[in-house]
Amino acid sequence: MKSIKKIIPLMLVLAIVFQPALSKADSKLGFENKVKAYYTIEQDYSQELLNYNENKPLAIASLTKIMTYVLVMEDINANKYKLDDKIKIQTQYAKPEASTMQLKKGEELTVNDLIRGMMIVSGNDAADELAVKSEGSVGKFVERMNKKAAELELKSAKFYSASGYPENDKENIMSAKDLAKLTTYTINNYPQVLNYTKTQKLVMPTRKYEAATTVPFLGKIEGVDGFKTGTTEKAGYCLITTMSLKPNDPKNKVVSVLMGAPTKYDRNTYQKIILEYVRNSFEPMNILNSEKPIETKSVNSVVDKNVEIYPTEDVSILYNTKTGLQQKVDIKKDLKAPLKKGQIVGKVIIDTGKGDKREVSLVVKKPYEKADTLTRIKRSAKYTYELLEALLAS
């Protein structure tokens, strides 16, 4: 058998031929001794882009509220309560000195108001009130948070509070890698969360309340649409930022987690460096299209002779212009008719760097019948003649 057509984008061919052999991309950005961890991924495929100390469990402060949001949305989707349900603020959670939302005993707010306060201005009291609404007490809600973490395989996670505020000197912990995983899960399952995180100012006229979001870069760095901040003395200044590489394009969104910066200024400075590095170093590239054959094989035993081979899924990645990528097409050498529709005939291995490898199966999209004996003999004879002719010519 011989290949008569390979459909691989020219850019990809050039990348494979002319780029250096793929190795771990240099993830050192020069401020590793100033922060506790960072981790940046592409959202759709969790393609790792940058990393430093990403597996170490660290205090997460108000980044906790992402998990609180997930559980509240689970309840709403299960019709346990509604966004417009009203909650009367309880005494023990009305702590203006410990929360930016400044809830007061006896006032009534909707569930949606409290979500806004929790996700936009990081209200600790709002998170606690939502926890009580869900489970009757903060303690029971925290138990559920830990169960959900186990369900999502966030192995580094341990929760003691619904808000991230220290509980009896204990603080919620999670690794940067698991935080990226949780954030991706949240956006994929509850995309409306971005309506909260991209809001630049929380305004509640009836409460005479107005406050700017805690999330930086909104309206300042193109493509940024949230996501969450967190700060305690132990955690330092933490920040998760979501950004589309191309404005208004939901594809190729990056999730960047930065943990343990010494000051708010440092947190913003280092996260900006990460976002600019990613934008300048990675380009979106469509690698595979399930509607286009990746290769056409000449198979003597098939009636039509030419067999079109397709990937089973579309693949779009962020291509690192500094390190290149590798793609290996591995098609079975002993293809013989008959071939059934959907039959797996090989695989594509895509190596995007930093140990990230993806395998995609290759299939035929229609049945291929076996050619008659005389046709197969003629084809074999012709192939043998052409091979001998080529050898003599060389």
Image (cartoon, helix red, strand yellow):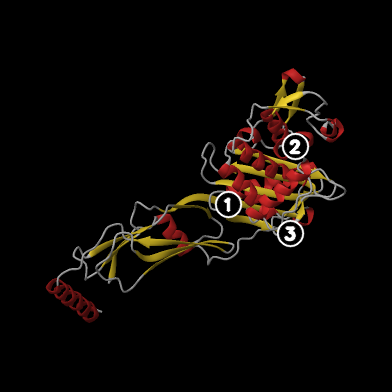
Residue 357's spot in the image, x, y percent?
Answer: 52, 63
Alpha-carbon span between mark 3 and mark 2: 31 Å
Task: Indicate the quadrant containing the N terminus: top left, top right, bottom left or bottom right.
Answer: bottom left
- Number of numbered labels in the structure image: 3
Residue 225 in which image quadrant: top right
Answer few, some or many: residues within 10 Å of disc 2's Cα (few below 14, many 20 plus, some between 14 and 19).
some
Mark closer to the chain start, 2 or 1: 2
The residue type indicated by label 3 comes to Lys
Residue 307 in which image quadrant: bottom left
Q: Is residue 189 above or below residue 380?
A: above
Numbered badge on residue 281: 1
The secondary element bearing badge 3 is classed as loop
In this rendering, which labeled residue sits more in front, label 3 or label 2?
2
Evaluate if marks 2 and 1 touch, with contact meaning CB atoms under 8 Å apart: no
Q: Give the camera-side residue of 144 and 164.
A: 144
Mark closer to the chain start, 3 or 2: 3
The residue type indicated by label 1 comes to Ser
Q: Residue at x 15, y 76 (%)?
A: 377
Q: Residue at x 60, y 47 (%)?
A: 184
Disc 3 target residue: 56
Q: Is residue 72 above or below residue 384?
A: above
In this rendering, which labeled residue sits more in front, label 1 or label 3?
3
Alpha-carbon span between mark 1 and mark 3: 26 Å
Residue 98's spot in the image, x, y percent?
Answer: 84, 35
The secondary element bearing badge 1 is classed as helix
Residue 323's spot in the image, x, y percent?
Answer: 55, 60
